[in-house]
Amino acid sequence: DIQMTQSPSTLSASVGDRVTITCRASQSISSWLAWYQQKPGKAPKLLIYKASSLESGVPSRFSGSGSGTEFTLTISSLQPDDFATYYCQQYNSYLWTFGQGTKVEIK
Amino acid sequence: QVQLQESGPGLVKPSETLSLTCTVSGGSISSYYWSWIRQPAGKGLEWIGRIYTSGSTNYNPSLKSRVTMSVDTSKNQFSLKLSSVTAADTAVYYCARDSRSTGSGKAFDIWGQGTMVTVSS
């Protein structure tokens, strides 16, 4: 299995901050990496796919980068609606696996 | 636009079989993979497995011995059965469209709202 490790687990930030979340894969996954946002009681929402492609309708303040084993999700200017938990997911080889999540909290 | 809706019992007894159905509306179920994902309360996401409209499946090895997925293209539905459940199977279960193999190369781009399943006597 490919293990996905996110850091940090929790992040405290203020509105307007630039926020970066890191995801590391235990082996190369090329660019088959997705990022999701999940709010309490809701299903995850796809933000980024193929490491850096922005899903339609997702604000441009979200961006993704990386390839191989190291990936980042960046929120350029944190907005009130962005306080949520973020998950990375590899879909390079079965089985699909998720990171443990990063909770972005209000500072 | 395509929408997914999970349905099934919210309470299942230990050792019995959990059965859920996901109904696809607003589009065809054909030519996509469809996945089941679960999330215990306060925890992360676990991929259970996926099925193609041809019936071809891939299951998480950790659950493979207990999982069966099926698809009914005439009803635009796919289903999950998880046998011999225990309290550890208590979770919110999501169905999702898996677009990895399409030209877009997306991952889980459409999700159902999720359904809570509790395993308890």
Image: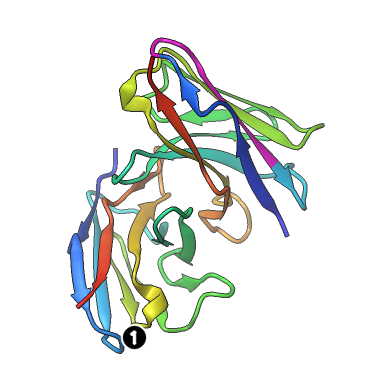
Task: Indicate the chain on which mark 1 is placed.
Answer: A
- Residue A40 among those drawn in magenta: no
Which residue occupies the foreground of this view, B57 or B96?
B96
| Residue B1, percent from left and from top | 73, 60
The residue lying at 50 percent from left, 30 percent from top is B58
- Tell me the residue that label 1 is attached to: A76
Q: Is residue B78 above or below residue A29?
A: above
Residue B110 vs residue B89, the one in the foreground: B89
| Up-down relation of residue B77 to residue B66 (above or below) | below
Residue B62 visible at all: no
Question: Where residue A21 sits in the image (x, y, percent)?
Answer: 25, 69
Q: Quadrant of the C terminus of chain B?
A: top left
Provide the major secondary structure of the magenta segment.
Answer: strand
Span of residues in magenta: B14-23
Q: Is residue B17 visible?
A: yes
- At label 1, which amino acid type do we have? Ser
Position of B27 relative to B82 (above/below): below
Q: Position of residue A13 (x, y in %)?
A: 22, 79
